[in-house]
Amino acid sequence: MLKQTRKEIGLAIVGCGTIGRIRAELARAYPGVGWVGLCDLKSDIGRKLATDINADFFTTDYRELLARPEVTATIIATDENFHFDPTMLAIEKGHDLFIEKPLATDARQSAQLFEQIKANDIDAVIGYTNRFRRRFLAIKERLITGQIGDVHSVVTRAFMNRMVPLATVQRTQDRATLTPMVVSGTHSLDMSLWLMEGKTPVSVFAQSTDKVLGKWGTKDSTFGIFTMDDGSIFSMNISWGLPEVWPGAVYGIEIGIVGSEGVIDVEDTHRDLVMATNVAQGAGYAPEGYTAPDRHVEFLTSYPPGDLHDGQLWGPMREETNAWYQHLYTGQRTPHATAADGHRNLLMTMAMDLSAKRGCPVELPVAPDELMKELA
């Protein structure tokens, strides 16, 4: 049931990079958002966005922004390693929260955030944009209605060019937990566990390799097999070490879901729409400070947030962001990942890294202290 009283949203956005900009532009266009304040340590980036969307307030200090009386909801869109402090302050202020994945890159901090979100009854969601793509919503509905029976086997494979890891690790020396699973594999893991809702992982065995990206302080690939509490199995594999000229803007996923009465096979590699051109193409994912080589072949529609047309972004991130604004404004239910989902996903991805480091299966769940003691 929708809320009977609609309350105007006062929105704070901490982090004005690629994703913060997308969310901010959509906020300014949404009728239920009455006030928008921005924060970024890089004042040039933040002030440019503030000017572009005619923001009501800008600062380089998130504390100053979150203390504003107009703020009722906060988006955390900082780099992965810097979610904890602004998120904890927003919880203390009682704000509704949208936190870009992961909840944190330290399992202990993730646990603290999750506990405080629960204790303070905070309405919090985590940014997993794939949940808002039409194909995955269609699959979810078929699974909910039992169209393929009881799911017993799932295989997931993700391929990414190395633009994302190179852009991610160059912004920090704290790289121990910036692995392919924690940063990017979490998207396909979240999707698979969402589609397998009701099944709980009880063990995982994984292996990793770092022949290419090891010199930058991260891994190339991690492959693992989860066993679930009902005996079903889930294979989760990711490589983000493909060449930077790989035509996918970010990543492509393949998922096979086998049930007692049927199967769903998902080919989501974006190879159905290919452009080859003499005109040099820039990087599909090009955060501030990163320069990628030119590409001449591209899998169109492979940029996860969506695609630009007439100066606007169209696609799943528009759906995801506006659905959250609608949820806050009207109470509409949405398929957003919860804080519980986000914390679970971090523990599962780190458990894969732990298993790979130990070279043996790991029983789940693993305590955050144990994960950080061995991985950090």
Image (cartoon, rainbow, N blue to C red):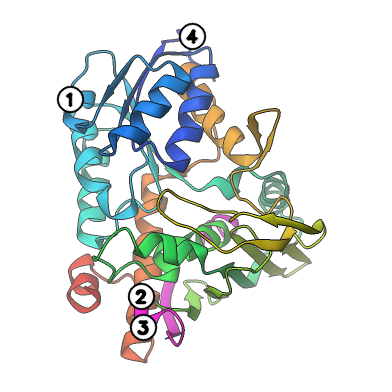
Asked which secondary structure carries label 2, the reply is: helix
The answer to which of marks 3 and 4 sits earlier in the sequence is 4
Q: In this view, does 261 lie above or below 284?
A: below
Could you tell me which quadrant the C terminus lies in? bottom left
- Which one is closest to the eye, mark 2 or mark 1? 2
- Which one is closest to the eye, mark 1 or mark 3? 1
Q: What residue type is labelled 3?
A: Ser
- Which one is closest to the eye, mark 4 or mark 1? 1
Q: Name the residue under label 4.
A: 4
Q: Mark 2 points at which residue?
A: 216
Q: Which residue is drawn at 28% across and 27% down?
A: 95
Q: Which amino acid does label 1 sit on?
A: Glu
Q: Which residue is drawn at 44% across and 69% down?
A: 181
Mark 1–mark 3 Cα distance, whole angstroms, equals 42 Å
| Mark 2 residue crowding within 10 angstroms, few (<14) / some (14–19) / many (20+) | some
Q: Which residue is drawn at 42% across and 52% down?
A: 341
Q: Give the range drawn in magenta.
A: 193-218
